[in-house]
Image: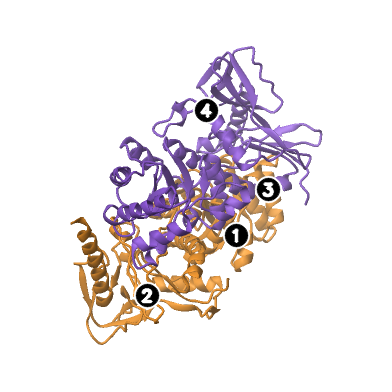
Chain colours: A orange, B purple
Amino acid sequence: MKFTGDVYAVKEGEVVFPGEPILTIKAPLIQAQFAETALLNIINHQTLIATKSSKICRSATRGAVMEFGLRRAQAPDAGIYGARAAIIGGCSSTSNVIAGKMFSVPVAGTMAHSWIMDFDSEYEAFKAYAESYPENCLLLVDTYDTLRSGVPNAIKVFKELREKGYKPRGIRLDSGDFAYLSKKSREMLDQAGFEDAIICVSGDLDERLISSLMQQGAKIDLWGVGTKLITSEDLPALGGVYKLAAVLEKDGTMTPKIKLSDNSEKTTNPAFKNVYRLYDRDNGMAIADLITLREEEVDETKPLTIFHPIETWKKHTVENFRAEELLKPIVIKGELVYEFPALLDVRAFSLQEKEKFWEEYLRLDMPQTYKVDLSTKLHTLKIDMIDEIRSKNAKKDK
Amino acid sequence: MKFTGDVYAVKEGEVVFPGEPILTIKAPLIQAQFAETALLNIINHQTLIATKSSKICRSATRGAVMEFGLRRAQAPDAGIYGARAAIIGGCSSTSNVIAGKMFSVPVAGTMAHSWIMDFDSEYEAFKAYAESYPENCLLLVDTYDTLRSGVPNAIKVFKELREKGYKPRGIRLDSGDFAYLSKKSREMLDQAGFEDAIICVSGDLDERLISSLMQQGAKIDLWGVGTKLITSEDLPALGGVYKLAAVLEKDGTMTPKIKLSDNSEKTTNPAFKNVYRLYDRDNGMAIADLITLREEEVDETKPLTIFHPIETWKKHTVENFRAEELLKPIVIKGELVYEFPALLDVRAFSLQEKEKFWEEYLRLDMPQTYKVDLSTKLHTLKIDMIDEIRSKNAKKDK
């Protein structure tokens, strides 16, 4: 079956919010139905991981974040496409070699515990590693005892490297109290004259622990984040849905459709729709997103009243704004019209777009809820349709 | 690179516990290293989902569980292999058509909201569905209003089906209060003479909600479980690791290796090992698992003292037991020697093995910790190796 319809979607890497139509499909029902599960799976997963990555990378106010999660990803694909999403969210590299190759992004990693354990002593293991990677010698120091064995052995090998004219890269801590160990290791490295050697940490990191380590003044220059990033551990599923919103009649008109639910956030927004982002003309910052009927024009010259999609008594008037259409044509009449950017360009776009949102919307604790509201026309249509179904059902009760 | 080593592993579907070597590899280091990430990814993921599935299926003390999670799985593979694991854990079918085909397991699903919304009325939608699937007519009743519209329309269509000589399958509830709605729907169906029509529910189910619904006497005959199963929502990663335990010397002897850690559960158990399950000779129930040195024999005729792997002062003596080796040969000298059973046979094996564990170990709340202990020889080796490294590091401090 060839797809003959139209697909509009937000650009990949764009900042999106709950309740927003980020993709619309206009196609014969059976074609749209076939695409449903694949689209939900891919978009839910990668949006989830990119969001988690964004939180983690923003909390690391100092030092880049490397994605390290493949061994704990939910199946191999989840590791590969999770790495892809992690890069979009802000990670600078991945330890996933296939993902690095597929998406042309930097691959990074350090030595393994098994390397060290294969030798008779930690010092011999470090020395052999330094001989293999003299330009990029990042030593894992927690196999036996970080401060009494690992860091002293690393310094010994670093001195030998320095004598040969190489600059050692640094050390990696993989267990223990990262705040304490990073400060102590920093002192030891500095005293030995290795002020430029970096301290990398890995092990059960997420945005909360990274924030806490930053607050404690931990001396960390590079973060390797695995399990909690690649699985979005505190929220491992995004609840995106795919709903019938309108049916094209034989005469060319669109009949809007709605699904009600006792859970009011599960009541759908009817009709073929569009989404605009409203920006403040004075400072360029995002004010709210607006869901409209597809054919509706947004008049930037007049004050605009927008409605909360569920708590419909909440309305808000916006002035002095600029409106930008978020849904871009991807496929038109079955033909791909969108040019996919390189992954690192998607990452750059995403980092740039986040700058348009006040910190209040992005912070970890009690973020302000960004408005994703309905236009007057869409709001009126929705309320009318709900009333009509309710009154039909009420009649049956009599 | 051809793999030339040996792999021993527990049989798929076997009950396993934290801290247990469920797979051992004896191979040239570089070969073992190449297998690491793939094995961790696959075993961590499928063990995790099979465990979650087991909890969910055991809590559904009445009615089968269908796996419904693909749209929320973390990437397509996670949906397919997650479905596979869900079947092993106890699910009776999956909505994932590819997984059904790949693993020869039953595929199941019901109608979608979009089917209903595509018609002018719910009744017309049900009627058309009943005409397409007269033998398997399970109607989704929550699109507009479950009790005022969905169930009455379903009953109307069921009566028409009955007149044509068909037996309707039942209804599906997908939102709202399942306890209340299932009881009310049951009454309505029974009053209309459809005592055999089943009530299926789906929507945010997990082992906790299912237990609660069972306790409330909800009238549910079939469960569709999606998001929280396919992502193991409350614990989305299993922390399985892959560690170097011994190095084969040129003279043919094995030198055991250990990795220490400030986090004591991260300290490895040294040496090439074996795992036995000890059963009570009187009732056949599992008593404890025992990790031994590879060459060690377990003497069933004498009392056996076993040691807690971390809290080493905790020891326990077992008598009147039967010991069974858990690690089976999978690959020997690079040749596959294991015959993979059909997935439904793995499921049957797993259900049967769980019967050998007291409910106290399997219950959801405060389960008793099942012992996974060390033999005297392994315990002594571990303690000696830790002491040796500690005293070497202590000497350096002087």
Give percent across and percent down for residue A264: 28, 59
Dots 2 and 3 on the same chain: no
Q: Report the disc number at residue B355.
A: 4
Name the kind of residue labelled 2 in the image: Phe
Q: Position of residue B260 (x, y in %)?
A: 57, 37
**At label 4, which amino acid type do we have?**
Glu
- Disc number lying in front (2 or 3): 2
The residue where tag 1 is placed is: A108
Query: Which type of secondary structure does the marked residue at label 3 adopt?
Result: helix
Query: Alpha-carbon neighbours of circle 3 within 10 Å: few (<14), some, or many (≥20)?
Result: few
**Residue B52 shows in this picture:** yes
At which x and y percent is residue B318? 56, 16
- Residues at marks 3 and 4, common chain? yes
Which residue is identified by label 3?
B35
Amino acid at pointer 3: Ala
Q: Residues within 10 Å of mark 2 (few under 14, many from 20)?
A: many
* Chain assignment, label 4: B
State the residue position of label 2: A272
The answer to whether residue A152 is left or right of residue B170 is: right
Mark 4–mark 2 Cα distance, whole angstroms, equals 54 Å
